[in-house]
Image (cartoon, rainbow, N blue to C red):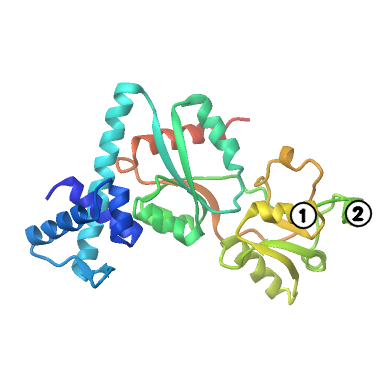
Amino acid sequence: MDIKQLIYLCNLERERHFGRAAEASFVSQPTLSMRLKNLERELGLSLINRSNNFDGFTAEGERVLAWAREIVSVYQGLKLEVESLKHGVNGTLRIGVVPQCSVSLPVLLKAVHDRYPQLDYRVAVLSADQLLESLNSHTVDVGIGFFEMATLRELHFQAEALRDNGVELVYHPHHFPGLAATDDALSLADAAALPLCLAEPTRYFRRYLDNHFRDAALSPRVILESTSVFQLIQGVQVGLGCLIAPGGHLLPEMVPALRHRRLAIAPMARHAALVIAEPGRATPLAQHFFDEVRRWLVQP
């Protein structure tokens, strides 16, 4: 057994396809298949369900895969640690984020970039549940999203709570001049009477809104629904509707014509947080990133 075989196994889990896993591993498909069959022979176990295509892992394969994730994560962490010792903090950090959270990710990344300019970032947009799964399986180094803090403590993650800026309605005053008459908090009933641009219903923030509308016996008109925040903002910009979003999520400089009204709504059950693996298991890049964000968050 060698580390490359375990990396191939992890790549196969991620890609769910032999050809794509081979491309991700920078080997030919026959080479990847042969090395994985050699691993099965060495362990004396069938790890992969094979038909004409990849058909998932056996029960034994899932157990071996759990160990493979851990070993590959430690191996990659060791490589990054060596690079950091030789060249300082540099490399690529894998970040998983939910589409709407209470912080502007580019602002946060710029703050870290000022301290560690050699860091690069690859950002994946995930649902809240996918994000926790990706952190558990080490397919992302850092998670930024909505979490149950008790669950994070039970799983021994390091977590830094992000500031709760409440929830706001974003609108264009030219198209909705009545909303600009006051800066007072908007009631849920008033928001439900407006055409809304919202994230699609599987997202945690959308489920949170839908639950409150339902509990208040309100049936809002969602005129635009999308997984893309960019599309939602464009809908607001042209006056198609109004966006409900966590406060602090949007950069005001990007949409100077838009205005905001705080929404009178109970806080979310989950809390926005920055999350990495426990000390000793987090990659060096993730730990440096986490520590720098913590310092940045407490600055006035």
Residue 36 quadrant: bottom left
Q: From where the camera sits, is residue 150 visible?
A: no
Q: From where the camera sits, is residue 53 visible?
A: yes
Q: What kind of residue is marked 2?
A: Pro
What crowding class fits label 1: few (fewer than 14 Cα within 10 Å), some (14-19), or many (20 or more)? many
Q: Residue furthest bottom?
A: 217
Q: Residue visible at 12% across and 61% down? A: 40
Give the answer, above or below, for where 17 lies relative to 259.
below
Mark 2 sits on what residue?
177
x%, y% of residue 32? Answer: 21, 54
In this rendering, which labeled residue sits more in front, label 1 or label 2? 1
The C terminus: image quadrant: top right
Q: Nearer the viewer, residue 164 or 70?
A: 70
Q: What kind of residue is marked 1?
A: Val
Residue 223 quadrant: bottom right
The numbered dot on residue 236 is 1
Find numbered disc 1 in the image and state the secondary structure of the residue it sits on.
Answer: helix
* Side of 72 relative to 2 (left or right): right
* Side of 28 relative to 119 (left or right): left
What crowding class fits label 2: few (fewer than 14 Cα within 10 Å), some (14-19), or many (20 or more)? few
x%, y% of residue 141? Answer: 39, 45
x%, y% of residue 80? Answer: 31, 34
